[in-house]
Amino acid sequence: MIMKNFIEELKWRGMLQDIMPGTEELLNKEMVLGYIGFDPTSDSLGIGNMVPVMMLLHFQRCGHKPIALVGGATGMVGDPSGKSAERNLLDEKTLNHNVDCQRKQLEKFLDFNCGDNAAEIVNNYDWFKNYGFLDFIREVGKHITINYMLAKDSVKNRLENGMSFTEFSYQLVQGYDFYYLWKHRNIKLQMGGSDQWGNIVTGTELIRRMDGGEAFAMTTPLIKKADGSKFGKTEAGNIWLDPKKTSPYKFYQFWLNASDEDASTYIRIFTVLTKEEIEALETQHKEAPHLRLLQKALAKDVTIRVHSEEDYNTAVSASEILFGSGTADMLQSLSADALMDIFDGVPQFNIDKKELTPGIAIIDFLADKTAIFPSKGEARKMVQAGGVAINKTKAESIERMISTDDLLKETYILVQKGKKNYFLVICR
């Protein structure tokens, strides 16, 4: 494999924050084993976790060997970095389930079967499960002073409100991870988010003090939206990689709705498009910003890699149905789950399916059975003006009947009033 300059790749993508002296020279000299730790507090990674995942992906594409460490042991302790309060600790069964789920998600990004620089996943529970407390504090704890630990931002920021010994000791546990991997696997580099810098450097310090060895560190900036709000969250909560937690449609919409400034940042960090491809897209976008070419390219790349091309196509069709020139055929092609997902939040009405045999006059359906219109008079005027569509097909006449033939997936009828007002009628 041809080695590429990993640091230069990170710089133009805006993905480099802190770097320990000597790191770039090491990376340009040899294939390096480097790792990033992932916190298994959930059974899914969120899009905030995609920043370190993409760091590992670019690391591998530049010819190095990426290691993803899932913290089966550290997950039992709790990382205080960036936290204002101590979190609930999970039991072993839940942690193991979360680790397995995250492992499957990581396998979508990294190549685990490409020879010398194939990715690997390790679990720090494997080397901590038989490590006794007394042995740990005797062999590891004696090398790091209290003053050194107190100087870390992750500790200082929490001291005022109180911090348990469990969380205080976290940096020692994470530091030992680095020492163990350096000692037993020749892993010389740890990477992570900038909030992890203190914990990572503790690892390099342990390696130096315990064995006189040398190791290296680098971090990415924490991503924020242009308006200063937290990246990866919406009013509905976190954006997850698991389709059961965040549907592919909502996932796609998150990226599609990015501001121009954010899209320019995100497309560098979260896609594998080249610098030339991105700059060409930005030029096209400036010429016709209303087409949102930058957002569409970003949403396509990320949705396909996290989910699938089929999920991406469904999300595009759904978006066209809601916001563009989606057709009745597009609507018919959606699954029941996709229908419920894209029309989540629109007004819904329930009627008995039996009432659709032999059928209901459209005016009665719109005003009496569903209250989509407040009166039959208003419903009649809107239908006559061509302002009502049933399942994306314009209702041509007030004589039209609504029957079981109109059911989507044998259950749903989509009513559109004007250009943007949708109603979902559920018939059971």
Image (cartoon, helix red, strand yellow):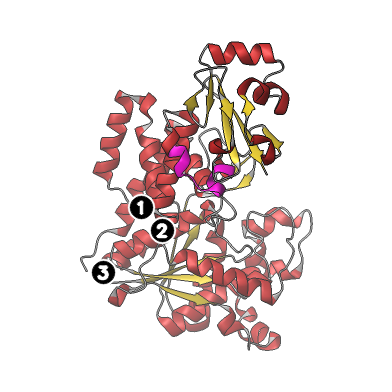
Q: Nearer the viewer, residue 285 or 365?
A: 365
Q: Look at the numbered disc 2 and give the secondary structure of its residue.
A: helix
Q: Residues within 10 Å of mark 3 (few under 14, many from 20)?
A: few
User: Mark 3 falls on what kind of element?
Assistant: helix
Which residue is pictured at 66% across the width and 86% down the height? Answer: 138
Q: Which mark is residue 29?
A: 3
Reading the image, the residue beneath label 1 is 10
Decide which of 85, 240 is in the foreground and name it: 240
Indicate the secondary structure of the residue bearing disc 1.
helix
Q: Residue at (63%, 89%) from the top-left corner?
A: 130
Q: Residue at x 48, y 55 (%)?
A: 50
Q: Nearer the viewer, residue 413 or 8?
A: 413
Q: Which image quadrant is residue 287 in? A: top left
Mark 3 or mark 1: name the one nearer the start of the chain.
1
Query: Which residue matches tag 2?
Result: 55
Image location of residue 269, percent across then percent down: 40, 48
Q: Tell me if mark 2 has few (under 14), some (14-19) or many (20+) residues whose alpha carbon lies within 10 angstroms of its own.
A: many
Image height of 252 relative to 194, above or below: above
Separation of disc 2 and disc 1 at Cα? Answer: 8 Å
Quadrant of the rendered image containing residue 377: top right
Q: Which residue appears at 49% of the width and 40% of the height?
A: 253
Residue 331 belongs to magenta span: yes
Instruction: Work out how far the residue at label 3 is from the one at label 1, CA to CA, in angstroms.
Output: 17 Å
| Marks 2 and 1 in Cβ contact (< 8 Å) | yes
The residue range painted magenta reads 330-340
- Residue 342 is left or right of residue 292, and the answer is right
